[in-house]
Amino acid sequence: MEILLCNSRADAVALTAELIAARLRATPAMVLGLATGRTMEEVYDHLATSGAPFDQCTTFNLDEYVGLPPDHPQSYATYMRQYLFDRVDIDISRTHLPDGMAEDLVAAARDYERRIAAAGGIDLQLLGIGASGHIGFNEPLSAFRSRTRDKILTPTTREQNAGMFGGDPAQVPKRALTMGVGTILDSRELILLACGSAKADVVARAVEGPLTSRISASAIQLHTSCKVILDAEAAAELQDIDYYRFVARNEEKWDPYRQYL
C-alpha cells in the first residue's frame, strides 16, 4: 500500500484524476472501475476536461440503489451520465452498473460478475470510503471474499447519503447492489481517495488498524497495488504519517506529481 499525502483537497482530487488519465492514455482499452460521491464529482470534472481518451475503455460502477430505475434523478446511472459519461467520448454501451431494478437480484448480481469476467477483469478500481468504513456498499461484517450482491444499508450510510435525497435519510433506499469486497480486491490496481476531517478516524482504522470485516475498507491492506490518496484533514489521525510523507518525497516515480505532495 502507498499512502500519498496531498497539500489540500484540491490537490488530492487533481492527483487522483491525473493518475487515472495517465492510465487511460497508456492503455486506452483498459477496464475502469468507478465510484460515486461528492468527492468523485470533482475527480470526474478534472477527467472531463483532461482530454484523456475514453472511447475504447470499459467501465463498471461499484454499486446502484435497489428500486431506482436508471432514469431516476438520484440513481447512480443518472449520476454517472451527469458527471462523466455525457462529458467524455465514451461508448455508453461499454458502461455498466448493477441492475437495481432486477426482479431477481441474485441473478442480476451473478450477471454483473460474469460481465466483469468477460471484460477481462478490472484494471483500475477507484474507491471512496464511507463513514461506516465501507468500500462500495460493503457494510460492516461483509466477508472479504464476498462477490456482487444486494446489501441492506446502515443508518449511518443512509444519513451520509441523505444529501442526494433532499436531506431526508428516510428517502434513501434501504438496499443496494454492490460489488463484493472480493470483487474489488480482484482488481489489478486500487486507488482510494478520501478528503476531509470526517474521514480521518475511519481512514486511520482502514489503513493502520487490524483487518476486520467491521471495516470493509481495511481489506485494501491485502492488495499488492493500492494507493491511498488523502488531504491533510483525512490523514490527520494516521500514526505513521511522517514515514508516509518521507516515502512519497523520496520515491522518484512521484517526481512528476511533486506539486501535489
Image (cartoon, rainbow, N blue to C red):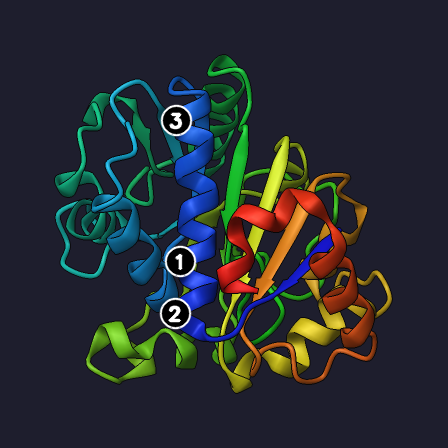
Where's residue 38, x and y in %? 33, 68
User: Is 57 displayed left or right of 139 in the figure?
Assistant: left
Element class at badge 2: helix
Residue 13 seen in render:
yes
Where's residue 146, x and y in %? 67, 42
Q: Residues within 10 Å of mark 2 (few under 14, many from 20)?
A: some
At 66% across and 84% down in the image, what residue appears?
Answer: 236
Q: Which mark is residue 51?
A: none
Q: Could you say which quadrant of the image residue 228 lies in?
A: bottom right
Task: Please state which of residues 129 and 156 is positioned toward the viewer in this rendering.
Answer: 129
At 67% across and 39% down in the image, what residue appears?
Answer: 185
Which residue has dot 3 on it?
A: 25
Q: Quadrant of the C terminus?
A: bottom right
N-term mark: 3 or 2: 2
Label 3, label 2: how many angstroms apart (C-alpha)? 22 Å
At 13% across and 47% down in the image, what residue appears?
Answer: 71
Which residue has dot 1 on it?
A: 14
Task: Please state which of residues 128 and 64 is positioned toward the viewer in this rendering.
Answer: 128
- Under mark 1, the amino acid is Ala
Which residue has dot 2 on it?
A: 10
- Under mark 2, the amino acid is Ala
Q: Are marks 3 and 2 in contact (CB under 8 Å)?
A: no
Q: How many marks?
A: 3
Q: Are marks 1 and 3 in contact (CB under 8 Å)?
A: no
Q: Residues within 10 Å of mark 1 (few under 14, many from 20)?
A: many
Q: Could you say which quadrant of the image residue 159 lies in?
A: bottom left
User: Is 235 displayed left or right of 207 in the figure?
Assistant: left
- Under mark 3, the amino acid is Arg
Where's residue 252, x and y in %? 69, 45
Element class at badge 3: helix
